[in-house]
Image (cartoon, grey):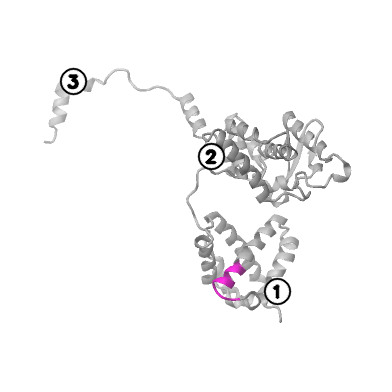
Amino acid sequence: MKPNDFAYYLTNFLTKYLPDDVGASINTIASYRDAFMLFLKFMRDEKKIKVEKLTLSKIDKDVINDYLNWLETSRKCSISTRNVRLAALHSFFKYLQYENPDNLFQWQRILTIPVKKGEKGKLNYITLDGIKLLLDMPDQKTQSGRRNLALLSLMYDTGARVQEIIDLTPSSVHLDQPYTIKLIGKGNKARIIPLMEAQICILKKYMIENNLLEIYKNQYPLFSNKRKEKLTRAGVGYILNKYACMARNENDLLIPKKVSCHCLRHSKAMHMLQAGVNLVYIRDILGHSSIQTTEIYARADSKQKREAIEKAYIDVTPNEQPLWQTNNNLLKWLKNFNK
């Protein structure tokens, strides 16, 4: 069986173009790969075209639109997920414009498919009392409980993305003063986050218990499962939801119905904002490329808005009724006006 043109270009796109020419991160490449795995599944199950029979000539704008609609309707993906998958396809067909210009018009028609706008959901975060309750749930008498406390408290204190926590190694942590941790974010951008002494105490005990201070373990995963493998996104999500359910049983008013790993990141940002930390510093801690991204927390904090308005409020309303309201003749004239 001869390889088809779609297989040839997709392989080069994922293994050469993205890592070598674009310098895309491992996570970006993995995300694009997942988008195409779903596309192949769609073509097989919905269009009845096997992978080995799929050629570029069978892919056009209508097919891509059908795929995007399938993601939303059959797989129940959110609009944001749909747009992530579309971004992967757009990148591939931009690449094809130069690698396969014979079908340039076909690729450009696909590139005209717009990003779909959706209703912006409410920013989901946990109050400070809720975070305290959540971190009180892990059983510190067990080894897994101590690991989970170190994991969740570090996620909250650093405002890290879940992948940034998963990718940590012991060498990322600076246990001498000033205490810091190095996170590798989107686009392989590194940032240094200061750590408080209370967090260092939890983290250091955990690292000592698991021999993670040994030099030969410098590049081991900082947080691993029972098989000593790096935790997965699903694994971290399972840990968080386990304790969120326990905390909700204690006080369901403090823990939202839906809790995600990103919810801890939102919570840290909101708490810093409420404590008066400048948005520029919050941006740097979260690793946002633009201050506009960080401003969502300022817009979402209705409590801070109200306090700011109350602080700046000047009472300009009169204590007594205006004269015209006590002028019976004028009131009578206004009532009869234009009758």
- Residue 266 in view of the camera: no
Q: Which amino acid does label 3 sit on?
A: Asn
Give residue 256's mark.
2
* Marks 2 and 1 close (CB-CB < 8 Å): no
Q: Which amino acid does label 1 sit on?
A: Tyr
Q: Distance between the residues labelled 2 and 1?
A: 47 Å
Q: What residue type is labelled 2?
A: Pro
Magenta span: helix, strand or loop, mainly? helix
Report if residue 320 lies within the magenta region: no
Of labels 2 and 3, earlier in sequence is 2
* Residue at x 29%, y 17% (from the top left corner): 320
* Residue at x 69%, y 55% (from the top left corner): 27
Name the residue that disc number 3 marks: 327
Q: Quadrant of residue 295?
A: top right
Region rendered in magenta = 39-49
Give residue 8's mark.
1
